[in-house]
Image (cartoon, rainbow, N blue to C red):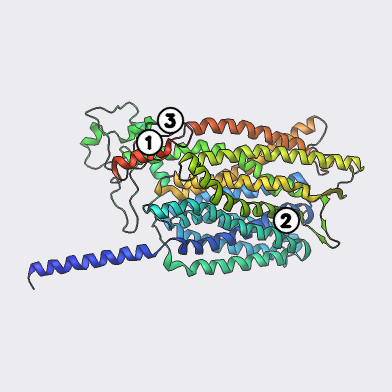
């Protein structure tokens, strides 16, 4: 065989291998893979809400805590659960990858539920409280690895370079949230009923069984998943850009000092199954960071490029993306603070009202949380199938309205939510006063529990706008290699919001005690929970004004793909979203 024939055979074999890999890549991912991942997320949400929805009643009824102390303990646990995702995102991006992190964290979560079941059943009474708190914080650790990775891993199953799948991904976030709401809704009805009428041990045993089945389902899809290998800590990139720009704060871009635009070549190596980050267009915001990419005389004279002194322009733009999102995340803290009331005071309100259906059935107060899920189940298809197409005709935007506009609508509705809750609470207290029940905190007030329906419905609608919008923004606008970190930051918003709720409770209690009363006392008939809701409504109004100012200056991600024509098309799309010239 001559050299020419051997060369042709090698080329043919290479083509065959390339086609094989291309076929394998095309056969993986999509909805077929995403459904397995959704299953484990639905189970995790089922377990989370099966615990959190009624947790305040366990603290007050079983552990004898006051309402305010129980509310703060719930908020603290929710907050800590939202802090661990930062660690989970770091582990996933730097060491394990998303798939392995999800698998490990799901196992930890399952073990936490098993320990929780034991703590309310076979553990001796004098150890029960300590074991119970240990178990819920083991769950927090498991959630730390699960939450920042599972949604991102599911979204990764859709190829952004394919127009059809890119459009599908926009709807995916709506249907993803719809799926986990189903799990949460079932938990807040069936599981809470078991807790109140059968036993806490049985209820937690059901949660453990569901999680075990979901873990098996997740493993069944292992051959269909698109997996990306860890690329190192994204925080390293952020630190390198900040340090390099600080070192060159006196250097200016000139003919002699050009910009390092050889993107992604500093570390020089990408794993075979790891796609290279997309090239980002240069922007004018945070221009002081551009100094990190300026090549000065020291860089020219160096034999090896120092990543802590010279970064690529793409790295700089990635850090800019993160910095742009931070104010948006901070502006959503009030949203999380408002939603924290769902697990605490909303539930205690319901416990004082008439809850009977027929002669024998009492609605568990915490089960009203399922109304939020029902609202989302109804509203998401309406939003995705009716609102978005109608808005698309008006704005020309692919999603009907922009992600920032969607979040802003939700933030406005948080004000409405708190105003409605305050008015309903005022009516509840008035009825208690008219019937001489102000000093009877355990008496049933002759007011139907269904009066709380409006505030629960508004909570669900707010979630559809703000929470889903925040999920999509955090995924879409983060650098490709930092999306787990973006999901963790989104969870951090929820966590800090819970801590803010605790802080507001402390401040309100301190002000009330100085005035000689208690705004959030154990006797809700004598307390002024409606005042607390009005405070939250006022804070939400101020927060909305701040958010609008931040959103007007936000610059969306721009990717240099397909040349000038792609860039012009993107500019035309962004010009329709209705915020400002700065976003184009």
Q: Secondary structure at mark 1?
A: helix
The residue drawn where x is 61% and y is 50% is 379
Residue holding disc 2: 367
The residue nearer to you, when weighing 496 against 560, is 560
Residue visible at 51% across and 52% down in the picture: 173
Vertical order, 404 against 36 (above or below): above
Give the residue at mark 1. 243
**In this view, 97 is above or below 579:** below
Element marked by disc 3: helix
Residue 403 on image: x %, y %: 50, 42
Judge the density around disc 2: few (<14), some (14-19), many (≥20) Cα neighbours within 10 Å.
many
Query: What's the distance in space between the residues labelled 3 and 1, CA to CA?
Result: 31 Å
Q: Which residue is mark 3?
A: 581
Residue 291: image x %, image y %?
33, 32
Residue 470 visible, this angle = no
The quarter of the image holding the N terminus is bottom left
Q: Position of residue 564 (x, y in %)?
A: 29, 40
Mark 2 / mark 3, whichever is N-terminal: 2
Q: Identify the mark nearer the N-term, 3 or 1.
A: 1
Residue furthest left in the image: 2
Q: Is residue 584 visible?
A: yes
């Amino acid at each position: 065989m001559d050299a020419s024939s051997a060369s042709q055979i090698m080329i043919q074999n290479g083509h065959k291998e390339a086609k094989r890999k291309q076929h394998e890549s095309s056969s993986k991912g999509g909805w077929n893979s995403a459904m397995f991942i959704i299953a484990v997320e639905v189970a995790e949400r089922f377990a989370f809400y099966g615990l959190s929805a009624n947790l305040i009643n366990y603290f007050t009824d079983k552990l004898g805590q006051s309402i305010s102390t129980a509310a703060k303990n719930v908020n603290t646990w929710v907050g800590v659960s939202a802090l661990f995702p930062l660690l989970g995102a770091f582990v996933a991006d730097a060491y394990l990858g998303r798939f392995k992190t999800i698998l490990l964290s799901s196992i930890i979560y399952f073990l936490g539920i098993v320990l929780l079941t034991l703590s309310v059943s076979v553990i001796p009474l004098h150890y029960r409280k300590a074991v119970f708190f240990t178990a819920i914080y083991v769950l927090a650790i498991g959630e730390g690895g699960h939450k920042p990775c599972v949604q991102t891993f599911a979204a990764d199953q859709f190829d952004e370079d394919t127009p059809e799948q890119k459009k599908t991904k926009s709807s995916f976030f709506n249907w993803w949230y719809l799926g986990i709401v189903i799990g949460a809704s079932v938990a807040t009805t069936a599981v809470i009923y078991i807790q109140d009428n059968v036993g806490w041990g049985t209820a937690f045993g059901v949660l453990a069984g569901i999680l075990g089945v979901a873990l098996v389902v997740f493993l069944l899809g292992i051959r269909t998943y698109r997996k990306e290998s860890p690329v190192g800590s994204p925080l390293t990139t952020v630190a390198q850009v900040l340090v390099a720009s600080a070192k060159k704060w006196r250097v200016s871009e000139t003919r002699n000092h050009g910009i390092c635009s050889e993107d992604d070549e500093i570390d020089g190596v990408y794993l075979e199954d790891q796609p290279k980050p997309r090239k980002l267009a240069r922007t004018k915001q945070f221009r002081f960071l551009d100094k990190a990419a300026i090549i000065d005389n020291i860089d020219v004279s160096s034999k090896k490029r120092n990543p802590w002194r010279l970064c690529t322009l793409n790295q700089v733009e990635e850090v800019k993306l993160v910095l742009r999102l931070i104010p948006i995340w901070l502006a959503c803290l009030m949203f999380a603070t408002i939603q924290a009331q769902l697990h605490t005071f909303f539930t205690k309100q319901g416990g004082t009202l008439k809850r009977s259906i027929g002669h024998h059935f009492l609605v568990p107060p915490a089960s009203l949380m399922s109304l939020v899920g029902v609202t989302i189940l109804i509203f998401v298809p309406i939003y995705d199938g009716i609102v978005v197409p109608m808005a698309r005709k008006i704005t020309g935007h692919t999603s009907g309205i922009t992600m920032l506009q969607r979040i802003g609508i939700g933030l406005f509705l948080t004000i409405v939510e708190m105003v409605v809750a305050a008015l309903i609470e005022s009516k509840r207290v008035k009825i208690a006063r008219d019937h001489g029940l102000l000093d009877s905190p355990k008496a049933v007030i002759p007011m139907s529990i269904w009066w709380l329906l409006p505030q629960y419905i508004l909570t669900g609608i707010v979630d559809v706008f703000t929470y889903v919008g925040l999920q999509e923004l955090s995924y879409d606008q983060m650098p490709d290699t930092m999306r787990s970190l973006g999901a963790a930051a989104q969870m951090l918003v929820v966590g800090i919001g819970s801590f803010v709720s605790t802080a507001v409770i402390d401040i309100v209690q301190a002000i009330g005690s100085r005035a000689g009363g208690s705004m959030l006392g154990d006797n809700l008939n004598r307390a002024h929970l409606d005042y607390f809701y009005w405070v939250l409504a006022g804070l939400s109004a101020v927060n909305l004004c701040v958010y609008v100012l931040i959103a007007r200056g936000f610059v969306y991600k721009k990717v240099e793909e397909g040349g000038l024509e792609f860039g012009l098309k993107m500019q035309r799309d962004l010009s329709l979203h209705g915020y400002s010239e700065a976003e184009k």
